[in-house]
Image: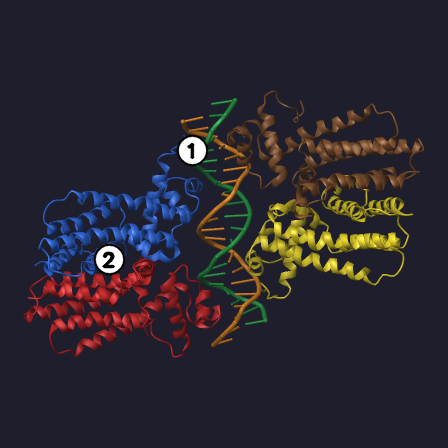
Chain colours: A yellow, B brown, C blue, D red, E orange, F green
DNA sequence: TATGAATGAGATTTCATTCAT
DNA sequence: AATGAATGAAATCTCATTCAT
């Protein structure tokens, strides 16, 4: 019966995943390194072997897990040919699926909660996550206006409004859902939002 | 006697106000009882004279400060006579003004951040804040449909979508604004959202 | 039966004394804050109430305890009238008595051991302790030469040599005595050193 | 087989040298096994292959490195024919050169700092280093008295006084020099001390 | 024999809460 | 009623030592 195994390569990801789950539900301060270690199946010391401090671990978690997701979505839509209306629907749905399936629904809540404790991280998030998605949406809206699918509008503000609901839904899913109406589904709210928005902007 | 009833003295309110300011900006764990005491101009011991624990203080703060705001809005619209379109605009704007002017923009972030640490509080918030506003909005939408101002729609989901943006904007204001584009204004985003929504639901 | 007493004024000195005893025997790293607290009859938290960190406590201990002793000796000899030979004997004996009676024999060892960990403190010690005593001794030697009591000599180096033995004796007393010949006495070694030195420098 | 005997391999010596350098500058607790391993060009595990614990390594270091130095000096003077005055000068200078050139100036500081943590080691040091040098010096002094070079005196105490300065100088070199007057040199202080002592004891 | 990943006991520090004054 | 000194539980982080590879 071995006391432990040598798993140099797998450890970082395992620890990051454990961190995501716990930070995501309990927040930065309430999550204890011991909990993360237990969740990852290692000892406290091992966490420190890979990440020099709790703060570093937190930041790395966001950096390492968010960026690939953004790129995924960017890639997914980059070759799109067709109506912007369809594309907008695609983007919104795709975003939610990506975030949900990779367990990242807790991240927006974390960033909002800990913004002032991690200014660098928040700047990163605003620039590399929020602004990049924003750009994607603005482009779609602009193209739609050009191609006569959408009315003229302030596309920057419209993009913000569209995204605001999506982000809220992901926070609601993580924090409030269990205290709210059990049968409410993010997917339904998203569908309704798409309808509303398209009705509002379509020509 | 409900526990969120005001006491006669001035002290409790002063402490609550201090708590609102500090919890609202730094979150529950990072706010120290000592900070609140200093901010309220009293000593640490005095805080404990009025609130038996930090958790209680936190809960009371939400109870005592949120309820009157809801009632304010409910009262404000109760005697309304006129178009539902106008009323919807009024409600949305009024809500933001009320929250902003009473320094409560930080509350949604707090609730979302600390939901699992304060299940009772979250239940209270969902029931007495979210659902009550939701009801208000749903009524307006239903009346609008009845009076032929609005299209037929799933008013419950639509109300959720409308509110989601509003709540997100208040979190953005508290946490992300300073790391985001400086010239973005919540008021403009709200205005754009109203336009979008009305374009989407108007007949 | 009281759990504790309020002793705001006495605490700092009590903690400093406990720190002196423990740091002096076990060194900086091996002395635990818990030990100091126990020795001072308070809890760990109380130590932190008065000194914000272990390092600060250590530095304060040296600052607060050494300076008055230097001043004591300076004062003691300032009004001296008479032979420099006698004065030199007085100074040497007085220094040892002062250091011994105030429990400060451990300080030189501490400074030597921890010099690189506390550069500021070491600079302070070199400047305000070593150099001040050095100046005192050099003055006496110079006066002695002037008054024809002593031979011409390099008084700066001679002062260093005289002091070196004294400092070593105090380290020997703290660290080695108990492992060395039990009947050896610092006082005897000092006496012998005075004889030797005076024989060496007297005309 | 005494435990401080050299092993045949090169490794133990390399580790010991690394230990000497690091313990000598940073002290026992602040020196990490990892640092020693890195300095010796091996891995942490390898250190434990040769020395069962940090404490053992520390002790062995002193045992293995000090003894040959003492023997060197003993040998050096054993065949001496001539004036004891010259011999005393020789011994003092030789001691300093030996210690300095083999990087052992840090040892006295270490012994003094860690005495109570390593009672065995301290006893060894007192017996096999201090007392042996002491004996050498006392013999020279006794011979000098016999041969009418020196006055009658308490040779035991005089030897202590002579050595005390030397030991202090080596601690000063290791710890305080860089915080003290930059142009002071141990060699000059030793020269002055020799002068002083000889003037004091010569007939 | 050699490595360095993994462990866990133990240290410093923080701070909600208590309680002497 | 008010204060703030005192407490001690709990959290982060370190590192000597072990042991799988």
Q: Is residue A56 left or right of residue C52?
A: right
Q: Residues within 10 Å of mark 2 (few under 14, many from 20)?
A: many
The answer to whether residue C171 shows anywhere in this view is yes
Task: Estimate the x, y position of residue B144 in percent, counting from the top left.
Answer: 90, 32
Label 1 marks a residue whose chain is C
Q: In the picture shown, does residue D163 fall above or below A120?
A: below
Quarter of the figure with residue B154: top right
Which residue does the numbered mark 2 point to in the structure image? C168
Residue at 18%, 63% in the rendered image: D162
Q: Foreground: D25 or A17?
A: D25
**What separation in Å lies between label 2 and label 1 (alpha carbons)?**
45 Å
Q: Foreground: B154 or A117?
A: A117
Quarter of the figure with residue C18: top left
The answer to whether residue A3 shows anywhere in this view is no
Q: In the picture shown, does residue B55 fall above or below D69?
A: above
Label 2 marks a residue whose chain is C
Q: Is residue A136 left or right of residue C169?
A: right
The number of numbered discs placed on residues in the rendered structure image is 2
Q: Is residue C84 left or right of residue A118?
A: left
Quarter of the figure with residue D149: bottom left
Which residue does the numbered mark 1 point to in the structure image? C3
Residue at 93%, 31% in the rendered image: B147
Could you tell me which secondary element the residue under label 1 belongs to? loop
Q: Earlier in the sequence, mark 2 or mark 1?
A: 1
Indicate the quadrant containing the N terminus of chain B: top left, top right, bottom left or bottom right: top right
Task: Estimate the x, y position of residue A106 in percent, counting from the top left.
Answer: 70, 49
């Amino acid at each position: 019966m071995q006391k432990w195994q040598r798993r140099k390569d797998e450890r970082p990801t395992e620890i990051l995943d454990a961190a995501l789950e716990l930070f995501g539900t309990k927040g930065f301060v309430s999550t204890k390194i011991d909990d993360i270690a237990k969740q990852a199946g290692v000892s406290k010391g091992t966490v420190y072997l890979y990440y020099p401090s709790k703060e570093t671990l937190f930041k790395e978690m966001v950096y390492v897990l968010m960026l690939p997701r953004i790129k995924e979505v960017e890639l997914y839509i980059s070759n799109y040919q067709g109506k912007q209306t369809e594309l907008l629907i695609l983007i919104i749905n795709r975003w939610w699926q990506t975030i949900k399936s990779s367990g990242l629904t807790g991240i927006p809540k974390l960033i909002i909660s800990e913004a002032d404790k991690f200014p660098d991280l928040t700047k990163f998030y605003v620039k590399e996550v929020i602004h990049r998605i924003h750009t994607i949406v603005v482009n779609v809206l602009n193209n739609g206006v050009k191609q006569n699918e959408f009315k003229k509008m302030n596309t920057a503000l419209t993009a913000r409004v569209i995204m605001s609901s999506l982000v809220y839904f992901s926070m609601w899913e993580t924090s409030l859902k269990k205290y709210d109406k059990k049968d409410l589904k993010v997917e339904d709210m998203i569908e309704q939002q798409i309808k509303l928005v398209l009705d509002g902007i379509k020509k």
